[in-house]
C-alpha cells in the first residue's frame, strides 16, 4: 500500500512540474523518439558521421546494422519494438554512396536524400565545443516555407533533430544551434556552438546584451557578447523523393533534377573511353597512311631523276 501511495504521489508531482509552465498544457508532451541505424557496407567516414549524430541526439536509440536493402518496410516493426515513432536510416551503396531516409513510423511519410560532402567532427578540428546531451536550437531557412515538399521536409527535420524537453539522456541546457539552409536545391546542415564572452569591445556581427556584474560592488555593467562557433559535423543533402507511407506507398514528390551518382560515373568513364578511342584511331590512321604511301611508291616505280639512274 505504501509503494502504491508513493507511485501515485510521484506521478502527481511530475504532472505538477510539467504543468508549471504556463505556455504548455499539463497533458501535452513532446514524445519524439528516433531509431537510428545503417545498412551493411558503410565506410569508416560514414560510420563516424552516424556516431556524431547519435551523440547530438540524446533521444535517439541506435541499433545494429540492417541486413537487407529491399525490404525496408521491416524497419517499422523494428521501430515498434524500440517504441520509436521516427526512423533515421542510412543506406550505403557500393561503399561510396550514402543515402538517408527520414521516416515517420508507422504511417509515414518518408523522405529520401542523397548525402554529399560529409565531414565528421574529427576531420574538421574546429575549436568549438558543446555539452554532451544538451538541447539544440533549430534554425531553418525561409526557403523551406516557399514550397509544399520543403515544408514537409522541415516538419520531418523538426521531429527528428529537435530534442524534446525532458527526454532520455538530455540535459536542461541549450548551447548549440543546428542550421538547415537551402542553397542550389540542396539542404545544407551545419552545427554551431553558442559562445558567450563578457567584453567591453563589441565584435562586428555579434549580438550584445547588457549583463550586471554579480561580484562585489555589482553596480557596474558589462557587455555580454554572443557569437557562433562551428563545431561540426557538416554535410549536404539532396532531396530525391517523398513517399506517402513509411518506406512504402505512393510517390507524392520526385526531384526531376536529381542525377544518380552511378550515371555520373558512367558518363565520366564513357568520356575517358571516348578520348582513348580517339587516340587509338589516330594511331591506326597514321599506320594506314604509311601503308598507302608505300603502295603508291611501288606502283609509280623508281624516280627517273635519282642519282642511281642518271649516272648509271
Image: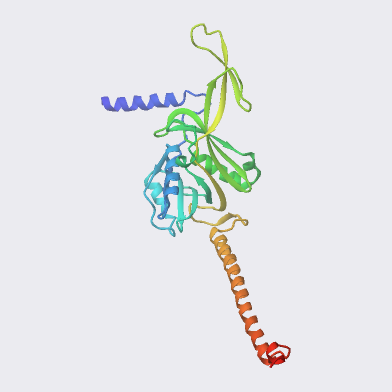
Q: Where the N terminus falls, by quadrant?
A: top left
194 relative position to 291: left or right: left
Q: Indicate the quadrant where residue 50 lies.
A: top left
Where residue 124 sits: x, y (%)?
A: 49, 40
Taking depth in this image into account, of 254 and 201 the one nearest to the observer is 201
Residue at left offset 44%, top offset 48% = 45
- Residue at far left of view: 1
Figure label count: 0
Where residue 287 sits: x, y (%)?
A: 61, 79
Q: Indicate the quadrant where residue 13 lies.
A: top left
Where residue 192 sits: x, y (%)?
A: 53, 34
Q: Can residue 258 be seen in this view?
A: yes
- Residue at far bottom of view: 312
Taking depth in this image into account, of 222 and 16 the one nearest to the observer is 222
Residue at left offset 44%, top offset 55% = 73
Taking depth in this image into account, of 241 and 248 the one nearest to the observer is 241
- Residue at far front of view: 311
Q: Is residue 112 visible?
A: no
- Residue 11, compared with residue 243, is above or below; it is above
- Residue 127, compared with residue 42, is above or below; it is above
- Residue at far top of view: 217
Where residue 119 sits: x, y (%)?
A: 50, 44
- Residue 125, compared with residue 289, is above or below; it is above
Q: Indicate the quadrant where residue 181 lies.
A: top right
14 relative position to 6: left or right: right
Q: Where the C terminus falls, by quadrant?
A: bottom right
Taking depth in this image into account, of 258 and 18 the one nearest to the observer is 258
- Residue 266, compared with residue 25, is above or below; it is below
Colouring scheme, one of rainbow, by chain, secondary structure, one colour: rainbow
Amino acid at each position: 500500500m505504501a509503494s502504491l501511495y508513493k507511485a501515485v504521489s510521484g506521478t502527481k508531482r511530475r504532472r505538477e512540474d510539467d504543468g508549471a509552465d504556463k505556455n504548455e498544457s499539463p497533458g501535452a508532451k513532446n514524445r519524439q523518439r528516433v531509431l537510428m541505424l545503417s545498412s551493411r557496407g558503410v565506410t569508416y567516414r560514414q560510420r563516424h558521421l552516424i556516431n556524431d549524430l547519435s551523440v547530438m541526439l540524446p533521444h535517439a536509440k541506435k541499433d545494429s546494422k540492417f541486413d537487407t536493402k529491399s525490404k525496408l518496410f521491416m524497419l517499422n516493426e523494428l521501430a515498434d519494438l524500440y517504441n520509436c515513432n521516427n526512423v533515421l536510416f542510412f543506406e550505403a551503396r557500393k561503399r561510396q554512396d550514402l543515402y538517408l531516409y527520414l521516416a515517420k513510423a508507422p504511417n509515414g511519410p518518408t523522405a529520401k536524400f542523397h548525402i554529399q560532402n560529409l565531414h565528421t567532427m574529427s576531420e574538421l578540428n574546429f575549436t568549438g565545443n558543446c555539452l554532451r546531451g544538451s538541447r539544440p536550437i533549430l534554425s531553418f531557412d525561409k526557403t523551406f516555407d516557399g514550397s509544399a515538399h520543403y515544408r514537409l521536409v522541415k516538419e520531418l527535420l523538426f521531429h527528428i533533430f529537435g530534442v524534446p524537453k525532458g527526454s532520455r539522456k538530455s540535459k536542461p541546457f541549450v548551447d548549440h544551434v543546428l542550421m538547415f539552409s537551402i542553397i542550389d536545391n540542396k539542404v545544407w546542415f551545419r552545427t554551431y556552438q553558442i559562445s558567450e564572452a563578457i567584453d567591453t569591445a563589441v565584435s562586428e556581427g555579434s549580438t550584445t546584451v547588457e549583463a550586471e556584474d554579480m561580484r562585489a560592488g555589482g553596480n557596474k555593467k558589462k557587455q555580454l557578447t554572443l557569437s557562433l562557433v562551428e563545431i561540426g559535423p557538416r554535410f549536404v543533402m539532396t532531396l530525391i523523393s517523398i513517399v506517402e507511407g513509411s518506406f512504402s506507398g505512393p510517390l507524392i514528390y520526385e526531384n526531376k533534377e536529381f542525377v544518380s551518382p552511378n550515371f555520373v560515373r558512367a558518363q565520366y568513364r564513357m568520356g575517358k573511353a571516348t578520348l582513348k578511342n580517339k587516340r587509338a584511331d589516330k594511331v591506326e590512321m597514321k599506320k594506314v597512311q604509311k601503308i598507302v604511301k608505300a603502295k603508291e611508291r611501288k606502283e609509280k616505280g623508281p624516280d627517273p631523276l635519282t642519282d642511281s639512274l642518271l649516272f648509271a
